[in-house]
Amino acid sequence: MYATKLFQPIRIKSLELKNRIVMAPLTRSFSPGGVPGLNVADYYARRAEGEVGLIVSEGTVVNRPASSNDPNIPRFYGEPPLRGWKTVIENDLVNEKEDHHEWCNESSEGPH
């Protein structure tokens, strides 16, 4: 009975989603040198094909030495990584999915 709510649209302020299924951020370490490539774009395209209402992108790191303990975690600074994210965001396979949203998730992956 309550499970059917998962598949109903929802509006949260200005954000409208076709369903209530949200893919949480997963830091996958698949961006060599911190630069997301076509493999990352394809990964999110496959998630979009699965009819996920909202995809929160994987954790990224900022321009601070202690923010990363893995060179393959995508960065969110510098020209090559930002160009890589642009490729991911502008990927036709992701964007052709109606009502699909993708957001970036900054986090510190360094030692705590």
Image (cartoon, grey):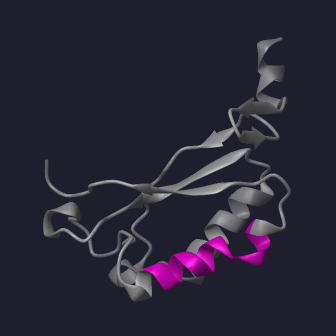
Instruction: Tell me the residue at 74%/67% (across/down).
Output: 94
| Foreground residue among 99 and 31 | 99
Quick check: is 69 in the magenta stretch?
no
Image position, residue 72 (x, y; %): 34, 74
Most extreme residue toward the front is 14
Q: Which residues are magenta?
A: 82-94
Q: Residue furthest bottom?
A: 80
**Magenta region, mostly helix, strand or loop?**
helix
Q: Going 71% across and 40% down the picture, which residue do you hit?
A: 14
Does 11 sit left or right of 108 as displayed?
A: right
**On-image quarter of the N terminus:** top right
The relative height of residue 9 versus residue 64 in the rendered view (above or below) is above
Residue at 72% from the left image edge and 64% from the top image edge: 46
Which corner quadrant of the image does residue 90 belong to? bottom right
Residue 67 sits in which quadrant?
Answer: bottom left
- The residue at the far top in this view is 1
* Above or below, 80 relative to 68: below
